[in-house]
């Protein structure tokens, strides 16, 4: 993507004329309340901690929503590595927050994190470089019901460009706007196995910001490939990559759901998952909502030669349904290359579930390769173009009190030791509900059976154990097979 195209893709051309200049260092631009309320910026959340004595909230960092119940952030935003423990204070999330005078406001409200999570390598103080594993997650019970499509994650992606957005609070170009989202952008400087460095200015408060690129010639199709965590000087930023080592753990976080009892106690609103067939049908009926341009060029698997292997792995929750797919560039290394898409998982559908590599039998339909119309529907859904925004939501407002927290400095160890093991969950609450334990009492019994029968025929997410968008015999079989105490 050309530099001018990338700058235009930030969606800020009308907000600030200095964007058009190639500033070598201070390129950051403050967002406004309009931009922070639309996808994907509305998924980026300010983090607050609660003072247990006064109940007041103070902002300190950033996270970004990746599912109805989960936000990704840095490990150092949830777990104090040097003290060997999770943050004691409660953490709250406010996505799409912007400053209105001395107040924060947004269209979606605020949620308290139910659990804090990180990975075993972040808690291991001997692991170096720590910047490679500085990631964590926050899970919460009630979803933000007006946000239905979430940040798309791209694993093992070698980008040449970085866009970062978060809630910087230090050394901003305009301190009167340091409670708004700040956007930074620039070239990639280093790409290592598990971490990256880029020419995009990062300061305190921006920890936990998503780092992404835009697909070629597409101002809406984001590809998040890293989580901002640190900087070395006044011009750059860096953080852990999304790679195969953390893929399974992040998938587990994205797919976490609270128990039925937790949802009932919290008074969560009812909400529905749009199945894959319904998503494809939506775009078949609303052609004006489809993405256009080279960035979404798709090939026909049934009419083209087999690809040379997967180019990137993606996970995303689209209209509240979890999707997982591989993309195969027909001209690897060329950003304008048409792609083919192989679906691995989608709500309400069954797919082959394994990536295709050269040498394997190539039967596109059986393997889950999508025809052009459905591939374009998936990418358009990924860009948030099936979301419907409801106006008139009462904005949540809270008094913002900036608090001082210990700054994480980049470690100076430059050698990357081989890392050939999957990352493992470390959680503030390891007693996670087991499948079938709908009331969260630690066992699967008649009480859970009653809750499932009460949800029969609906798409209640807690009782939909197999994730196909409805509660039926398949879910009942799973529940009966899990009868007894949870492991």
Image (cartoon, helix red, strand yellow):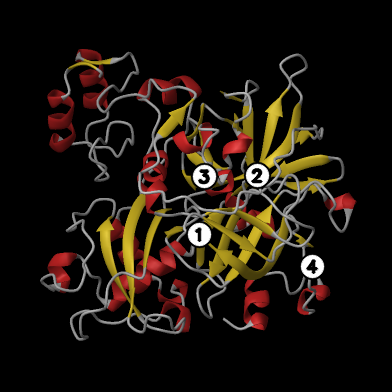
Which residue, given by chain and number where applicable, does mark 4 sit on? 25
Indicate which label's residue lies in the foreground, 3 or 4: 3
Whichever of labels 1 and 4 marks the residue nearer the N terminus, that label is 4
Q: CA distance from mark 1 to mark 4?
A: 22 Å
Whichever of labels 1 and 3 marks the residue nearer the N terminus, that label is 3
Which structural element holds mark 3?
helix
Above or below 355: residue 467:
above
Identify the mark at residue 186; answer none if there is no mark: none
Above or below 1: residue 177:
above
Identify the mark at residue 62; answer none if there is no mark: 2
Where's the N terminus, which quadrant?
A: bottom right
Indicate which label's residue lies in the foreground, 4 or 2: 4
Q: Is residue 144 visible?
A: no
Q: Nearer the viewer, residue 172 or 268?
A: 172
Q: CA distance from mark 1 to mark 3?
A: 14 Å
Using a 10 Å C-alpha cutoff, classify the residue at mark 3 as few (fewer than 14 neighbours), some (14 to 19) or many (20 or more).
many
Indicate which label's residue lies in the foreground, 3 or 2: 3
On the image, the x and y values in percent for residue 396 come to 70, 37
Which residue, given by chain and number where applicable, does mark 1 sit on? 225
Which residue, given by chain and number where applicable, does mark 3 sit on? 133
On the image, the x and y values in percent for residue 12 come to 72, 69
How many numbered discs sit on the rendered protein? 4
């Amino acid at each position: 993507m050309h530099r001018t195209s990338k700058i235009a893709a930030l969606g800020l051309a009308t907000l600030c004329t200095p964007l058009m200049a190639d500033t070598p260092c201070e390129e950051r631009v403050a967002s406004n309340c309009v931009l922070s309320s639309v996808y994907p910026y509305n998924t980026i959340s300010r983090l607050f901690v609660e003072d247990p004595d006064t109940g007041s909230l103070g902002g300190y960092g950033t996270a970004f929503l990746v599912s109805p119940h989960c936000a990704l952030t840095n490990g150092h935003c949830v777990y104090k590595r040097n003290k060997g423990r999770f943050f004691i204070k409660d953490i709250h999330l406010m996505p799409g927050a912007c400053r209105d005078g001395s107040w924060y406001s947004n269209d979606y409200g605020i949620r308290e994190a139910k659990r804090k999570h990180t990975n075993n390598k972040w808690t291991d103080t001997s692991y170096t470089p720590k910047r490679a594993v500085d990631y964590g997650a926050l899970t919460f019970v009630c979803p933000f019901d007006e946000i239905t499509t979430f940040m798309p994650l791209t694993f093992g992606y070698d980008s040449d460009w970085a866009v970062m957005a978060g809630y910087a609070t230090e050394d901003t170009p305009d301190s009167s706007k340091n409670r708004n989202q700040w956007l930074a952008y620039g070239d990639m400087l280093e790409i290592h196995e598990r971490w990256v460095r880029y020419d995009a200015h990062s300061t305190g408060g921006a920890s936990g910001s998503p780092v992404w690129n835009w697909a070629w010639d597409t101002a809406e199709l984001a590809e998040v490939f890293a989580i901002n965590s640190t900087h070395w000087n006044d011009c750059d930023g860096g953080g852990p990559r999304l790679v195969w080592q953390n893929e399974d753990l992040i998938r587990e976080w994205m797919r976490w759901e609270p128990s039925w009892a937790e949802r009932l106690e919290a008074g969560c609103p009812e909400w529905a998952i749009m199945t894959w067939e319904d998503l494809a049908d939506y775009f078949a009926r609303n052609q004006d909502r489809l993405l256009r341009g080279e960035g979404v060029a798709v090939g026909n698997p049934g009419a083209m030669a087999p690809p040379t292997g997967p180019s990137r792995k993606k996970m995303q929750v689209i209209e509240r349904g979890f999707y997982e797919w591989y993309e195969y560039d027909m001209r690897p290394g060329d950003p304008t290359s048409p792609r083919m898409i192989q679906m691995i998982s989608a709500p309400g559908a069954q797919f082959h579930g394994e990536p295709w590599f050269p040498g394997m039998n190539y039967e596109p339909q059986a393997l889950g390769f999508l025809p052009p119309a459905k591939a374009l529907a998936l990418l358009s859904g990924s860009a948030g173009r099936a979301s419907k925004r409801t106006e008139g939501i009462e904005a949540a407002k809270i008094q913002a009190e900036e608090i001082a927290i210990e700054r994480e400095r980049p470690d100076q160890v430059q050698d990357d030791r081989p890392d050939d093991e999957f990352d493992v969950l470390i959680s503030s609450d390891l007693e996670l509900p087991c499948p079938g334990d709908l009331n969260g009492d630690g066992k699967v019994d008649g009480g859970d059976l009653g809750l499932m029968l009460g949800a029969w025929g609906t798409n209640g997410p807690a009782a939909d154990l197999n994730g196909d968008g409805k509660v039926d015999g398949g879910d009942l079989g799973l529940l009966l097979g899990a009868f007894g105490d949870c492991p």
